[in-house]
Image: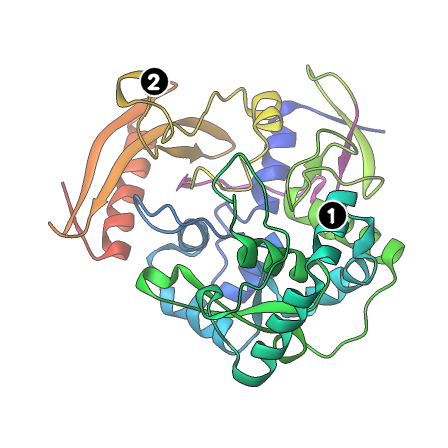
Amino acid sequence: MHELTRPQARRIAVQAQLLDADRPTELHTVVRQLTLLQIDPTAAIAPNADLVAWSRLGSAYAREDLTAALADRTLLELRAMIRPSEDLALYRADMAVWERESKHYREWVAANDACRRDILERLGGQGPLTSRELPDTCAVPWKSSGWTHNRNVSQLLELMVLRGEVAIAGRAGRAGRERLWDLAARVYPDEPAVPVDEARRRRNERRLRALGIARATGTALPVEPAVVGDAGEPAVVEGVKGEWRVDPAYLDRPFSGRAALLSPFDRLIHDRKRTTELFGYDYQLEMYKPAEKRRWGYFALPILYGDRLVGKVDATADRKAGVLLVNAVHQDVEFSRSIADAVDAEIEDLAVWLGLRRS
């Protein structure tokens, strides 16, 4: 059982996420280590995948690099996550046993099997296509109390992804928000599936390598768990209840920190409970709150300095005016001159990377 102080645990987490002073220099290195870049359409500053890459690579990162990697299929999009193409083998076995999904999903797909076949036929002859270009011949409409109500083709496509039948072949439209669908056989690498139990073990190991330290079990999160099963080795963290799992490769590794501005969806802070336990950091994404109830801003960026989360930057990219508008820098701890200077340099680098004038 490894006994860690909170600073030790935080440094492990920071290093695992490539946010220490030893910056990576290449996009594929970042994605392979993090295992994923989450796709989110919010672009108050920049799309999440780009913002996460910039946080690691700095202004040397070009958004065209991600576009090119998706085009040549070295990176692939799977369920709103960009992953290394070689990792697809770890998900194919689950696709083969997709019937383990909820009974509701299984019955709805079965009721609309004719529509499923129509989509496969259309993609086979004309793909890649957008969802709007695919036939809606569903016999039973999709029912939901939310925005997916009656979005039959979109919902069927999502379930066909789980079945391994279709895949996202690219994006089109304004800001690349419209997905292009094709037969999975044309998109995914032709590699055999890793058996289910082995694949899950390896995904847990990969996830722990990306997080550094995590819980074995916990609350389920959509698409990508935050827990790692029995991967790594057991550990306890001083002042935090319960047992953790730690990747031993990070133990006793020298640490040198830096400043970084993080996306609200960054995996360092994505598990809010873990963030509170290890960093003592209070954060909520406030874009869904009325303006008068926001404490930090619509899309405030958490500030990392060394192994501590020290504040938030409330900023907005006004592309029409050509300005990165910095509304406020919220200090959770009193900034020393070195912290203030480092944060200011990161804000300036963000503006340079966006091609905007800082205001």
Element carrying mark 1: helix
Q: Residues within 10 Å of mark 1 (few under 14, many from 20)?
A: few
In the rendered structure, find residue 334 and report the number of the disc placed on it: 2
Residue 40 drawn at (x, y percent):
45, 48
Based on the picture, tell me whether residue 328 belongs to the magenta stretch: no
What residue occupies the far front of the structure in this picture?
Answer: 139
Residue sitting at 73 percent across and 62 percent down? Answer: 163
Residue sitting at 48 percent across and 73 percent down? Answer: 129
214 lies above or below 334: below
Q: Which residue is mark 1?
A: 249
Q: Nearer the viewer, residue 37 or 19?
A: 37
Span of residues in magenta: 243-261
Q: Are the residues at dot 1 and dot 2 in contact (C-beta closer than 8 Å)?
A: no
Q: Nearer the viewer, residue 253 or 113?
A: 113
Label 1 or label 2, whichever comes before in sequence order: 1
Q: Split into 4 quadrants, where in the image is the C terminus?
A: top left
Residue 115 drawn at (x, y percent):
63, 65
93 left or right of 281? right
Q: Nearer the viewer, residue 11 or 291?
A: 291
311 left or right of 316? right
247 lies above or below 117: above
Callout 1, which amino acid? Ala
Residue 303 drawn at (x, y percent):
40, 33
CA distance separating discs 1 and 2: 34 Å
In the rendered structure, find residue 321 and report the number of the disc placed on it: none
What residue occupies the far bottom of the structure in this picture?
Answer: 125
Q: Residues within 10 Å of mark 2 (few under 14, many from 20)?
A: few
Callout 2, which amino acid? Glu
10 lies above or below 131: above
Residue sitting at 72 percent across and 48 percent down? Answer: 105
Q: Quadrant of residue 286?
A: top left
